[in-house]
Image: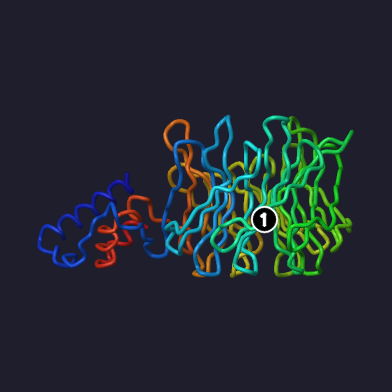
Amino acid sequence: MECKLKKIIVLSVIVLFIGVGFQPVFANYNITIANEKQQPFNGSFYKTFGGNEEDSGKHVQQTTDGGYIITGITGHTSYGGYAWLIKTDSTGNIIWDKNLEAYQTNYHFCNCVQQTTDGGYIITGYNYFWADGDNDVWLIKTNSNGNKEWDRNFDKTENDRGNYVQQTTDGGYIITGKTSEFGAGNVVWLIKTGTGGNLLWEKTFALTGNDISFCVQQTTDGGYIIVGQTGDFGIYYNDIWMIKTDSSGNKEWDKTFGGKGIDSGVCVRQTTDGGYIITGKIDGEIGLIKTDSSGNKEWDKTYGGTCGYSVRQTTDGGYIITGGALLIKVDSIGNMTWKKTLPYDDNGLCVQQTTDDGYIITGDVKVGFFNRDVCLIKTDKDGNVRNKAVTSNMLLLRILERFPMLQRLLL
């Protein structure tokens, strides 16, 4: 009720301003709202991209030019779908987008994108071959304009998947995901390539027969930290599984965390103190686990919701987490600073702190009864985001810029 009253007050005041002679303020702009690009307001915006099918943003990163790169999928139906790469400017307006395809495959899924040192992009996901039901890990390198330079398929069994990729300090790439081994079910797969995507080595790690990894990061000692899940096939229980390797992929140690329910580690980052932060699912809620450099748990927290998909350490030493419709900021020991619900039934899958201390989020939003679109959400440092009605209306934005006292009513 209070929110509706604020909106009524804002709209009434705006109409009053225009009606009593403030029109000359905008007389020289010649505004045609339908043709204007959407602009942010106070460093925040809300954008959606999509067509008539299932579209979803899986990963986002701020690029060196201040814009954003997003990867995901578009046109997903029972007959196929395309990997989608979207580049925007700093205000979320599309500069270009590309449908990435592979020869003779029906589905092209992209789960992760990173800008590379040459200004291009590295993407991983998987291809699905409808004819034989085979999934391959897929690695794609593009130039700075999103044009494919090369791609590689890694095929170990019929059920291979690439979930995360990072450029390594030697210029090559590290990929994690899953594969299968005879008699062992799903196992964690770690793949190291050279600069051109050529395979240098690969390792598998098995614990229970249903082991999957979702994230990998190169650590400061040149090795790798991996997180995922281990357990049965998701019916009764899973545990979070974290694996530390040396620079050649040999396991140094591993740790499991979890209770009696279905737990999963989805994202891991090395922290400034040399330890690790993990988000995922703990006892059916968004969970956060902090460990020391040897993987020993220092503390864990839960925050409601269903699952944490992405975590980053923030410049103040705390952490930002997104999962489902929630964006959560916590301090350095996991105490919640604030919790925000994303607008429009959004599903947040990836979050990163931006150079202005705000946050950029991608995921998907429900459109109508059956379809979903990619969403790109930019918030301020406190997690506030302008709704789409504001950030897509140039006239309203300029009114608010002209009369700052009205801005507080739309926070």
Residue with the mark numbered 1: 150
Relative to residue 212, is residue 400 drawn left or right?
Answer: left
Give the quadrant of residue 76.
top right
Relative to residue 42, is residue 283 drawn left or right?
Answer: right
Q: Residue at horizontal 82%, vertical 42%?
A: 156
Relative to residue 365, is residue 387 drawn left or right?
Answer: left
Q: Is residue 19 above or below residue 103?
A: below
Give the quadrant of residue 94.
bottom left
Give the quadrant of residue 291.
bottom right
Task: Locate the C terminus and report the quarter of the image it occupies.
Answer: bottom left
Q: Position of residue 191 (x, y in %)?
A: 79, 53
Category of crowding for the residue at label 1, using alpha-carbon neighbours closer than 10 angstroms: few (below 14), some (14–19), many (at least 20): few
Q: Position of residue 205 (x, y in %)?
A: 85, 47
Q: Please identify the residue farthest to the left as the structure is shown.
A: 20
Task: Locate the N terminus and report the quarter of the image it occupies.
Answer: top left
Instruction: Please state the total of marks drawn on the protein image.
Output: 1
Q: Residue at horizontal 48%, vertical 53%?
A: 376
Q: Closer to the camera, 385 or 151?
A: 151
Q: Secondary structure at mark 1?
A: strand
